[in-house]
């Protein structure tokens, strides 16, 4: 599948399954509004501005927000590959604080798949340093009201 087709598939499944998602929806006024784009290697990434409103400890992005960023990236990566799947397990490793007031990049890629199970990895980078990593297990699910997505 070409990048253009994968980006279209990402947008289609996102609008069908995640139209009000707190991480990736642009219609959720309380959400993060991330826009995921595809890379040649099939991974997705988005930039997050790390605004002070998401602070946990002083000048540090809240760990729950960091985890949400990576979970959302992993889900959107699966969308880009034409599937809809839900998080079954999420393991996050916090290596360094994500600093408030500096943009960060969240990136995700499929590590391995054996449908209906997908193992996906993600990372948050800031100032070209890996700040957090995650591994998630996702279970494929049918599209709402229409049978299988694939």
Image: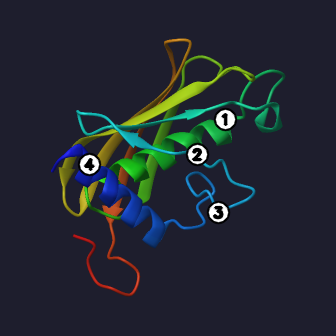
Horizontal side of 79 relative to 52 (left or right) equals: left
Find residue 148 and report its horizontal and vertical position in percent.
26, 77
Q: Is residue 85 shown to the viewer in this render?
A: no
Element under disc 3 = loop
Element under disc 1 = helix
Instruction: Tell which circle, 1 or 2, labels the residue nearer the N-terminal end.
Output: 1
Element under disc 4 = helix
Q: Residue at x 40, y 59 (%)?
A: 11
Q: Is residue 76 shown to the viewer in this render?
A: yes
Snapshot colouring: rainbow
Distance between the Cα atoms at labels 2 and 4?
Answer: 26 Å
- Mark sitting on residue 92: none
Q: Are marks 1 and 2 in contact (CB under 8 Å)?
A: no
- Mark sitting on residue 27: 3
Q: Select label 1 or label 2 by which is in front.
A: 2
- Mark sitting on residue 63: 1
- Mark sitting on residue 68: 2
Find residue 114 and report its horizontal and vertical position in percent.
17, 55
Instruction: Tell which circle, 2 or 4, labels the residue nearer the N-terminal end.
Output: 4
């Amino acid at each position: 599948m070409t990048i253009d087709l994968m980006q279209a598939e990402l947008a289609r499944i996102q609008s069908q399954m995640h139209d009000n998602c707190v991480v990736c929806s642009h219609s959720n006024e309380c959400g993060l509004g991330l826009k995921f784009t595809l890379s040649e290697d099939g991974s997705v990434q988005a930039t997050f501005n790390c605004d002070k409103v998401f602070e946990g400890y002083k000048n540090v992005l809240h760990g729950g927000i960091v985890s949400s960023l990576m979970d959302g990236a992993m889900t959107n990566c699966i969308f880009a590959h034409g599937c809809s799947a839900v998080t079954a397990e999420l393991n996050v490793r916090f290596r360094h604080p994500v600093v408030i007031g500096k943009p960060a990049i969240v990136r995700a890629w499929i590590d391995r798949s054996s449908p209906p199970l997908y193992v996906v990895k993600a990372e948050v980078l800031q100032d070209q340093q890996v700040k957090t990593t995650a591994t998630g297990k996702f279970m494929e699910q049918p599209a709402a009201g229409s049978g299988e997505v694939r």
